[in-house]
Amino acid sequence: MKPVIPIIPALPSALTREKTAAPGSAGDSRPVRISAAGGKPRAKAGRARGRRPQPSAGARGKARRLPAKSRRLGARAAGAAAGRSAVRGLHAAGKQAAAASRAWARWWNGRSRSGPGKAYLQQARSFMLGYAKASGLPVGRKLPLPTERSVAAVIHAASGHPSISAVLEQLGRLALDEIIVVAGSLPDEKRRLIREHPAGPVLVHYPEPLGYGAGRAAGARFAASDIVMFLEEHDPVQAEQLLPFIASIAKGNDLAVSAMPGQQGPFGGRDPAAMLKEFMNLTQGRRDLGTASLEHCPHALSRRALDRLGAASLAVPPVAQTAALLQGLRAAVVPLPTSPFRRAGIRQELYPFGAGPEVLMGDRLEALHEHLRATGPRSRYPDRLRKREAAKGAATCE
């Protein structure tokens, strides 16, 4: 009888074996990498355990980021949802826009912490269009505000300047609760133009002319909103550029003042007014304010600041700012693009406030006097140089 020889199948080559085993095992048919030092073969990273390669952190961040079109569609859907729940016929035209703006602020602040930049403007317009279509209210062209608090705008019309129509036009684009125009001794025709403007302002008219601060003080007394912006009739500011002032107060500041880049530069080349304004801010520990002051518009104040200072204090803006800083109210500078009007502020005699340079300088000196009276003759600065004890017993002048 012939011996039975068992037939043993040939082992597959390390590089050409058949796919007869689990991935990564000895029978895996997929190519493997042979190390140069003759070590063990190792499979490609991410495949040895049968898992897909994981994306990097940067790739994961990009995957979660929605395109701008998708974000706009999301804002429009949110606006439509808010518009369907809006109650019609209970608000005037201005109140309808304010209600839509508060719905936008709830949605935006609940999903984003960024300020009113490009993304804010794109999604805000989409939200308002969705709100208007779902509710049937004429608010689609309004620009919503980054806060649920009520906002008012006060304009001082010293002479009925022609630019006041442009100022009101920009304010009419915002979903404001109040627009108040304070004027003194305007002719009937200019008063009629203000009253009939589509922005719907409230005109407060005085028979006598008002100073540059008295008009703001009167407007602050009539405003009932939580945030009050102050503007001048000579200087139209785009509605988009006013949103950072509102956002600054909404974040917790009490004063949001305009930066004055035209008054920076070498200290010796500045005019005396800019020197004194910066000196006042330095003595109060606010180097960051530079030459910013409540004298310049636009600026915004919180209701807390108005209640503490009193509306009457705004009649002398430098004194009001000094009192605010002495009381610990929070102030911040808001960048604003320069304009011919603001560049003219470098020379105070060209600044159309309705007050001459002597009056303005006198207001600043009055503010300095109030500051020294509250902090002492050295304004809290210690006297570390002089040795007065060395002069004891010396002759003194009568």
Image: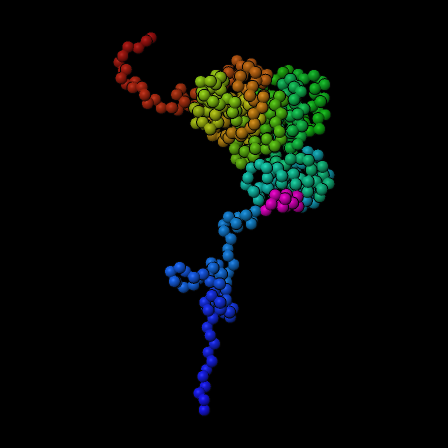
Magenta stretch encompasses residue 75: yes
**Front in this rendered view, residue 208 or 260:** 260
For image coordinates 66% across by 19% down, the residue present is 160
Q: How far across and down, in percent of the image, does residue 172 sit?
A: 67, 30
Q: Is residue 74 above or below residue 245?
A: below
Scheme of colours in the image: rainbow
* Residue at 50% across, 64% down: 30
Q: Nearer the viewer, residue 266 or 250?
A: 266
Rendered view: 224 above or below 346: below
Residue 132 position in % (x across, y down) = 70, 40
* Main SS class of the magenta portion in the image: helix
Residue at figure coordinates x 63%, y 46% from the top left = 70
Residue placed at 52% from the left, 59% from the top? 52
Residue placed farthest to the top in the image? 398
Span colored in magenta: 66-78
Image vertical order of residue 185 relative to residue 225, above or below: above
Instruction: Pick the quarter of the image with the N terminus.
Output: bottom left
- Work out which residue is located at the far bottom of the displayed protein and give it: 1
The percent coordinates of residue 248 (x first, y second) are 54, 33
State yes or no: residue 73 in magenta.
yes
